[in-house]
Image (cartoon, helix red, strand yellow):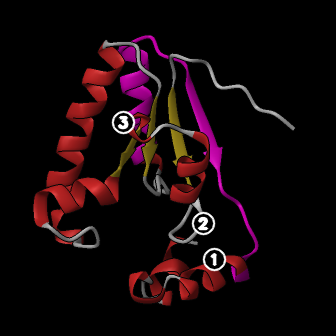
Amino acid sequence: MEIRIPETSLVVLIGPSAAGKSTFCRKHFVSTEVLSSDDFRALVSNDRHDQTASSDAFALLYATLEKRLQRRLLTVVDATHLQESDRQILLQYAKQYQTPIVAILFDLPEKVYFARNQARGREAVPNRVIKRQL
């Protein structure tokens, strides 16, 4: 099955850690189209897993998102977006810039998340984090 995403749209990925969101992005999008919360954490703290950097990281991510939407560029936001409030922020940006929004939900069997997380090795998050996200 082929899914077509409008050239000018905001794509929001929704799913817990280890769902395969970043892998999906690498397979289906050009790297410049993807705004990854992990990458922005790395930019502001040198550690893509430093949750204390999230506020600064998302401020920078949203500023970049706004510039891309102003230019009418396809933009993918690679973050968990598990909270409705997180998704509402993106809906507001899409509305402000009259950009279609596409949500892609990663809804997999629980055991898949844990197996993928374990396969990450040193990059794995604690299983309790995934349990909380689920």
Task: Give above or below for 117 relative to 76.
Answer: below
Q: Which numbered disc, 3 or 2, marks the residue that appears first in the sequence?
A: 2
Q: Which image quadrant is residue 63 in?
A: top left
Crowding at dot 1, Cα within 10 Å, few <14 / some 14-19 / many 20+, comes out as many
At 32% from the left edge and 13% from the top edge, which residue is drawn?
A: 71
Which type of secondary structure does the marked residue at label 3 adopt? helix
Residue 115 is drawn in which quadrant?
bottom right
Marks 3 and 2 sit apart, C-alpha to C-alpha, by 22 Å
Instruction: Measuring from the top left, give residue 65's x and y in whole percent.
Output: 31, 31
- Based on the picture, tell me whether residue 90 belongs to the magenta stretch: yes
Q: Nearer the viewer, mark 3 or mark 1?
A: 1
Q: Can you give x and y, in whole percent of width and height, for residue 107 in the image?
A: 71, 60
SS under mark 2: loop
For label 2, the residue is: 19
Badge 1 vs badge 2, beta-carbon distance below 8 Å: yes
- Label placed on residue 89: 3
Q: Quadrant of the C terminus?
A: bottom right
- For label 1, the SS is helix
The one nearer the camera, 58 or 89, is 58
Residue under circle 1?
113
Q: CA distance from mark 3 to mark 1?
A: 26 Å
